[in-house]
Image (cartoon, rainbow, N blue to C red):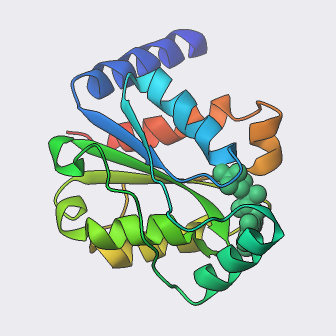
Amino acid sequence: MQNANLKMQNDNVKFKMNIMKVLVIYYSRTKTTKKVAEALAEKLGADLEEVIDKKDRSGALGWLSAGRDATRRYLTDLEPAKKAAGDYDLVMIGTPIWSWNLSTPIRTYLSENKEVLNKIKTALFCTMGGSGHERAGREMGGIIGREPAATLGLLTKEVVQDKFAEKLEEFINKINQTIK
Ligand SMILES: Cc1cc2nc3c(=O)[nH]c(=O)nc-3n(C[C@H](O)[C@H](O)[C@H](O)COP(=O)(O)O)c2cc1C
């Protein structure tokens, strides 16, 4: 009976998400968040876009600049986005946590698109070594002037070891509950 309920719940999730146009947009320095974004987009049949930072964040120097820029809440220069957030019903935004903050490229994306994102449903997914996603979710709400429908935090090791399917399903269910 429990399995039947779960199946009905999952079918319902797919149904609601299928009638929505969904964009998964993410920044990833070392491909952890990218892996989650790709899994989400495939599961939901969503469009996928990577946010590209013009600043080189690779290596030790890139790591240092990432930590400093995130702590100081700096913005950066991004390559122009190919997809317009305003064309979608739901925008799911993925970021690594940098110094208990949103990553600088995602802070920039949110700031540059806040008017549009304020009018549509959004959700935030984060990958992190330990913690910071709840604060990042609150910050995102402050930047765009609207709370994300759900915030997911995944540990880097859960993603690397492919142990995040259940949390992803819960995340989707939570967003689904907010769809009328
Ligand atoms: C500059 C910098 C600062 C970080 N700060 C935090 C932090 O405050 N808390 C945390 O849990 N993880 C922190 N991390 C770890 C990353 O959030 C984690 O490795 C993430 O999964 C990387 O995602 P990516 O591979 O998509 O870039 C930090 C990583 C970097 C590069």
At a point 65% along the width and 31% down the height, the residue shown is 166
Which residue is more in the foreground, 65 or 164? 65
Let me know if residue 150 appears in the view.
Answer: no
Q: Name the side, left or right, on which 87 lies relative to 109.
A: left
Q: Where residue 37 appears, x then y in whole percent?
A: 53, 38
Question: In the picture shown, does residue 89 fall above or below 40?
Answer: below
Give the image quadrant in which the ligand numbered 1 is located.
Answer: bottom right
Q: Residue at x 46, y 75 (%)?
A: 76
| Quarter assignment of residue 46 | top left
Q: Looking at the figure, which quarter contains the C terminus?
A: top left
Split into 4 quadrants, where in the image is the N terminus? top right
Residue 104 screen position, x and y as percent: 53, 72
Q: Position of residue 15 (x, y in %)?
A: 30, 19
How many discs mark residues in the rendered view? 0
Residue at the farthest bottom position: 72
Residue 160 left/right relative to 38: right
- Residue at the image position 47 percent from the left and 64 percent from the top: 106
Q: Note whether residue 164 is visible.
A: yes
